[in-house]
Amino acid sequence: CEMNRTDRGIRIKNRRGRGGYVKNIDIHGLKMTDVPYPLVANCYYRCGISDAELSGASSLDAMPVEETTPEVESISICSIRATGVKVGVTLMGLPESPIRDFRMEDWSVETLPGFSPDNPVIPAMDLSDTEVSISGIYARNVRNLNTIDIKLNGQDLCSDDMDIISPETKPSA
């Protein structure tokens, strides 16, 4: 499958109040050309939200788990080639319902010339307008993120290319 000049490649979107399950998804063999955000999984999706829902849905704090709490788990996305990229991967789970068991293997990501971490972007259309200043992987509230053979601009992905914030690994003060 090929994607050309789309604003995003693979998009998983949900939020509190919508509920539902996104589970057991396998995606293989995509080529993305001039796609600034190849993968966005976002449990803070803002489009179509009412003013009454806004405050609870946008909170970065853990909320009670209810029937309307979304679940995203057991996702495998392999053999991806992407060019024209700003941020390769953005994963934003909820504190009370983290994205679980997310596997990425055999990715090659080429960023846009001149992209600079000094100019953060907001890739996920999320309620918190989270700014991302890295071009590799940004992950918040993700458990068991497995990355194998990920290349960023021809080099193996390293810790400088990732910003991972999860319930188990909160940054130290």
Image (spheres, helix red, strand yellow):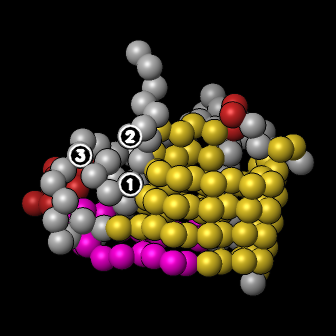
Q: Residues within 10 Å of mark 1 (few under 14, many from 20)?
A: many
Q: Secondary structure at mark 3?
A: loop
Do the residues under discs 3 and 2 have CB atoms within 8 angstroms? Answer: no
| Marker disc for residue 98 | 1
* Residue found at x 42% / y 47%: 141
The residue that appears at 78% across and 60% down in the rendered structure is 107
Nearer-the-camera pick, 97 or 114: 97
Q: Residue furthest bottom?
A: 1
Q: Is residue 23 magenta?
A: yes
Tell me the amino acid under the disc marked 2. Pro
Q: Position of residue 56 (x, y in %)?
A: 16, 52
Q: Residues within 10 Å of mark 2 (few under 14, many from 20)?
A: some
Disc nearer the start of the sequence (3/1): 3
The residue drawn where x is 75% and y is 84% is: 1
Please give left or right for residue 29 compared with residue 168 in the image. right
Residue 85's quadrant in the figure?
Answer: bottom right
Magenta range is 8-25
Residue farthest toward the right in the current orientation of the protein: 154
Q: Residue at x 30, y 67 (%)?
A: 70
SS at circle 2: loop
Q: What residue would you read off at disc 3?
A: 62
Q: Which residue is mark 2?
A: 167
Q: Tell me which amino acid carries mark 1.
A: Pro
Q: Could you give the CA–CA distance between mark 3 and mark 1, rounded to whole angstroms?
A: 10 Å
Is residue 82 in view from this perspective? no
Taking 54 as reference, is 72 above or below it? below
Q: Sequence order check: which comes first, mark 3 or mark 2?
A: 3
**Amino acid type, residue under disc 3 in the picture:** Ala
- Residue mark closest to the camera, 3 vs 2: 2
Query: Could you tell me how far apart the alpha carbons at marks 3 and 2 are, in whole angstroms?
Result: 10 Å
Residue 164 spot, x, y in % from top left: 53, 39
Give the crowd class for mark 3: few <14, some 14-19, many >=20 residues within 10 Å: few
